Amino acid sequence: MTSNDTPRAPHPYVGIWVTADGHIRQELLPDGRYDEARGNRQSAYTGSYTVTGNHIDYVDDTGFTATGDVRDSILFHEHLVLYREGDEHTQRKPRR
């Protein structure tokens, strides 16, 4: 195995982020893709993302672009405020 074959740890922002009411769930995947569910609608938005410092640039598969910033472990994504899944600010509701 060469040094180029060494697996890297996923970016610290990889994982599931959710609004406090649980309505919007955004999963940042380790391969630079994201999948966002809204309510009962799975994969409502999918696309790619890049991280520069604390800033995230999103490009939806339809070409729509958006941005986000992580501050104090909170993801501010356009008009949304998302927390890590399981954070004390989120209310985990059963899916229907």
Image (cartoon, helix red, strand yellow):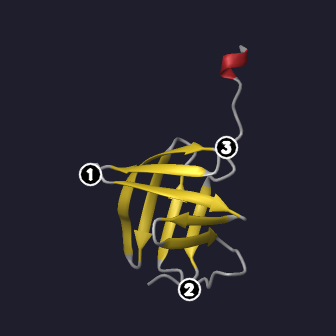
The residue that label 1 is drawn on is 62
Cβ atoms under marks 1 and 3 closer than 8 Å: no
Q: Is residue 62 left or right of residue 75?
A: left
Q: Quick one: 29 or 95, which is closer to the camera?
A: 29
The circle drawn on residue 10 is: 3
Q: Quick one: 37 or 65, which is closer to the camera?
A: 65
Across and down, in percent, residue 67 comes to 47, 55
Visible residue check, residue 63: yes
**Count of labels shown?**
3
**Which quarter shows the N terminus?**
top right
> At 38% across and 63% down in the image, what residue appears?
43
Above-or-below relation of 49 to 4: below
Cβ atoms under marks 3 and 2 closer than 8 Å: no
Amino acid type assigned to the residue bearing label 3 in the image: Pro
Q: Nearer the viewer, mark 1 or mark 3?
A: 1
The earlier-in-sequence mark between 1 and 3 is 3
Estimate how packed mark 1 is, as few (under 14), some (14 to 19) or many (20 or more) residues with alpha carbons within 10 Å. few
Label 3 sits on a secondary structure element that is: loop
Above-or-below relation of 35 to 40: above
Answer with the quarter of the image where residue 5 lies: top right
